[in-house]
Image: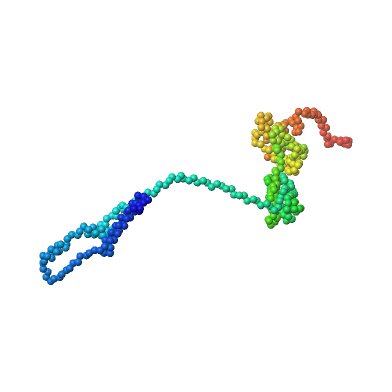
Amino acid sequence: MKIFEGKSPAERNKIIAAIVLGVMALVALSYTFGGMFFGSKKPSVSVSVSATPTPNSSTSGSDTQNSSLPSQEEENFVYTTTPVVYNPDSFYAPDAGRNIFAFYEPPPPTPYVPTPTIMPTPFVEPTPVPTPIPPILVGFVTPQNVFSGSKTFRLEVNGDKFTPDSVILFNGSELPTTYISPQKLVADIPSNLIGDAGERFVMVRTPDGRLYSNQVSLNVQAPPTPKFQYIGMIARKRYNNDTAYFQEEGKQTPISARLNDVVNGRFRLVSISAAETIFEDVNLGFRHKLALYRPEPGQNTASNNPSSPNFNSPDGIPRRDRNNLYNNPNPSVPVYIPPQGEIPGIPGGIPRYNPTPQQQPPPPPKKDDNDDDDGDN
């Protein structure tokens, strides 16, 4: 038969089981509804009724013959057509048995597939959006460098496509602007906008913000400061020819200066006091204050050489006496006192003239008040 052609053993078993179950179902149906599918002859029994039955030997013999046992065919028919009644609710019902026609077929083995490695998504840098070209162009500014703390100065902005209503923005602050031409604008920069050193930005735009320009930088530099320390002074009577002493960086010998002297070729000494000195920059006009340097006790102020003979004061400057204030009006500010026998401002090796003290003439005799030349007694 071609019904099993190309079938696996498991599929053949399933087909055989299905055929067997179908045949058994047909047999059960034929047994239940036998009159419809198979012809059957029912024995006819005639019954005679009599008032007083009398025993009859022939009748008894025929009854014995008619009540013979069923044939094997009839027994098989009854056995195959009797339905099986299974009621699990009854306590005497048997347990359901194992279904011998259920076959477990394991799934086919899965071929080995290695675990896939998840690769990270490569970063794709977004395409930069080009910066739009400003409608107004700023080329450069004049001046390009200023010193912090300078006075108000005039700033010139040079470029192209300036309009009469264009204004200059200095580090974000709008300034009163003078329109000169489509290529030049002028504004005054107040001193408070350049009080600190750093970079400032200049741009041009219209009040409505529709027209604007690129930014250019203006460098604000810190002004030069004196590179020395104020270490003391020699005060003379009536402030005549006072001398201040300074210790310069990298040098061991202090320098001295008087009023209006220029130190380091740039800073003019304009004020001397016991607490501070004031210098003026001869090129820029800036003024710098130098307070008196007060080192800790025992600290060398002249050099880094601890073996200096005058360790507590610079070389060539008299030692400071803390016990004698030399009639100092401000006791909190120490005053340098020259050593005994020396004159401030005059080297000690110069010979000095010491005049011999002259003898004082005798005092005149005491005149008597009553003695007169009037001739009286």
**Quadrant of the drawing holding the C terminus:** top right
Query: Residue 67, how many percent across, how many down?
Result: 16, 62
In the image, what residue occupies the spot 70% across and 45% down?
Answer: 219
Work out whether residue 77 or residue 193 is closer to the camera in this orientation and state it.
Answer: 77
Closest to the observer, 246 or 162 = 162
- The outermost residue toward the right is 375
Residue shown at 74%/37% (left/top)? 264
* Vertical position of residue 373 compared to residue 143: above or below: above
Rendering coords of residue 358 (x, y %): 81, 29
Residue 54 location, x and y as percent?
Answer: 11, 68
Can residue 39 be seen here? The reply is yes
Render colour scheme: rainbow
Up the image or down, 94 lies above or below 230; here it is: below
Relative to residue 109, is residue 56 depicted above or below? Answer: below
| Residue located at (35% from left, 53% from top) | 2
Q: Quadrant of residue 21?
A: bottom left
Q: Residue furthest bottom?
A: 51
Looking at the image, which is closer to me, 365 or 320?
320
Asked if residue 375 lies left or right of residue 160, the reply is right
Q: How many marks?
A: 0
Q: Looking at this view, is 228 or 80 the one in front?
A: 80
Question: Is residue 89 visible to us here?
Answer: no
Identify the residue at horizontal 36%, vertical 51% (top origin). 5
Is 9 left, or right, of 92 in this rendering? right
Q: Is residue 60 above or below residue 294?
A: below
